[in-house]
Image: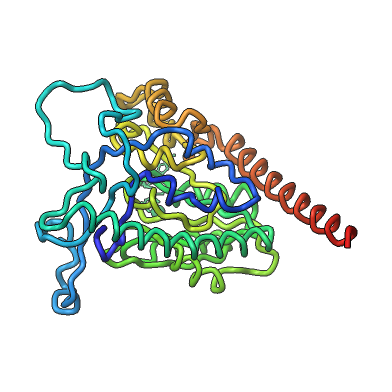
Amino acid sequence: MCTVCGCAESGDQSHAHHHEHEHAHPHEHARAHSHAHPHTHSHAHPHSHEHEHEHEHDHAHAHAHAHSHEHVHGHVHSHDHGDHPGAAEPDASPHLDCGAGPAGVEVAGMSQRRLVEIETNILARNDAIAEGNRQRLEADGVLALNLVSSPGSGKTTLLVDTIRRLGAEGVAVIEGDQQTANDARRIRETGVPALQVNTGKGCHLDASMVERALPQVSPPGLGLLFIENVGNLVCPAGFDLGEDAKVVILSVTEGEDKPLKYPHMFAAASLMLLSKVDLAPHVDFDMDACEAYARRINPELEILRLSATSGEGMDAWLDWIDARREALRQRALSRARQHLAMLEQR
Ligand SMILES: Nc1nc2c(ncn2[C@@H]2O[C@H](COP(=O)(O)OP(=O)(O)OP(=O)(O)O)[C@@H](O)[C@H]2O)c(=O)[nH]1
Ligand SMILES: [Mg+2]
């Protein structure tokens, strides 16, 4: 973990989604459990300094330091390290696997055991808050979608176009970025309330940030909440925010092997949007291969191809949201029926 970002990106679904085991209501992304946990990743990270204030001016190169500090992106469970599910063909060429230990990550000067302990604590706290968010959102009938991707894959552009098509009523957005309020401003231009969360050196939103943001961005009649996470294909994978589903966006300019290189995100997502397909003729990107890689990581991943610019695929995306909202309604209905039946039995 970097203690700043608290990164516990790990693909450790037993943590990231443990709520799914503990609660009666089904989450469609429970399937993330169904496969083994890839643990190949590398990560450039920010870091924690007790004397943070002393060099706040330095943030622009926060990632370039080679400090030794606490951070965990690893796994807290033991698993077979020979198993790299979803990885590309085994490569016999010499390489350094720094994620092969129980923590799934190395940090100079820290034991694997300590790393595992830190990650476990952070994720347990995060998951408890996320569960509170989820219960609150579900009780209010709000569908919350957590949009995750690398920087610039088109999250905000997609949201703006989605809102224009859906209409602004009952929609709100939480925007996560390290700095600036640019994205929240873009969203507000559509007439939808948006709250910008700046994470500073942090590289993902966590459940506590969403918990604090929610009261500020909940208009009456809220039914659909988009959370645009910090652009980062690594850390946001491990942090449950209380969302109904993670939607991973991958644009055709990024290279089709991203699901293999950054498997945790694709394992955690329920839907992959292959974005900017209007650019496909101009770039060397094999969409079929990309989808096959993504399904190798997560066989149940739903995939849609779209372009906010040309409008291609937007209807299917709106239909997907609708279906998700309907599933949420059905769950609420069935909970209400159960409750009624219980009362009648008394
Ligand atoms: N051609 C094309 N360009 C797009 C599309 N969607 C977004 N873009 C462009 O991609 C760039 C990044 O778009 P954003 O919507 O800001 O991406 P983002 O994922 O929100 O970026 P961050 O919040 O910084 O991570 C902008 O220049 C957009 O105009 C698309 O469907 N087609
Ligand atoms: Mg954005």
Q: Is residue 5 left or right of residue 32?
A: left
The quadrant the N terminus occupies is bottom left
Q: Nearer the viewer, residue 12 or 198?
A: 12
Specify whether 316 is left or right of 66.
right
Q: Residue at x 57, y 57 (%)?
A: 225
Residue pictured at 29% horizontal, 67% vertical? 200
Q: Nearer the viewer, residue 287 or 126?
A: 126
Q: At 68% from the left edge and 62% from the top edge, which residue is drawn?
A: 139
Q: Total label count? A: 0
Residue 74 percent location from the top left of the image = 28, 48
Quadrant location, the C terminus: bottom right
- Rendering coords of residue 53 (x, y %): 19, 79
Task: Give the quadrant of ligand 2.
Answer: bottom left
| Residue 151 visible at all | no
Where is residue 69 shown, x and y percent of the image?
16, 62
Indicate whether 79 appears above or below 115.
above
| Residue 130 visible somewhere in the drawing | yes
| Residue 100 horizontal/vertical position (percent) | 21, 39
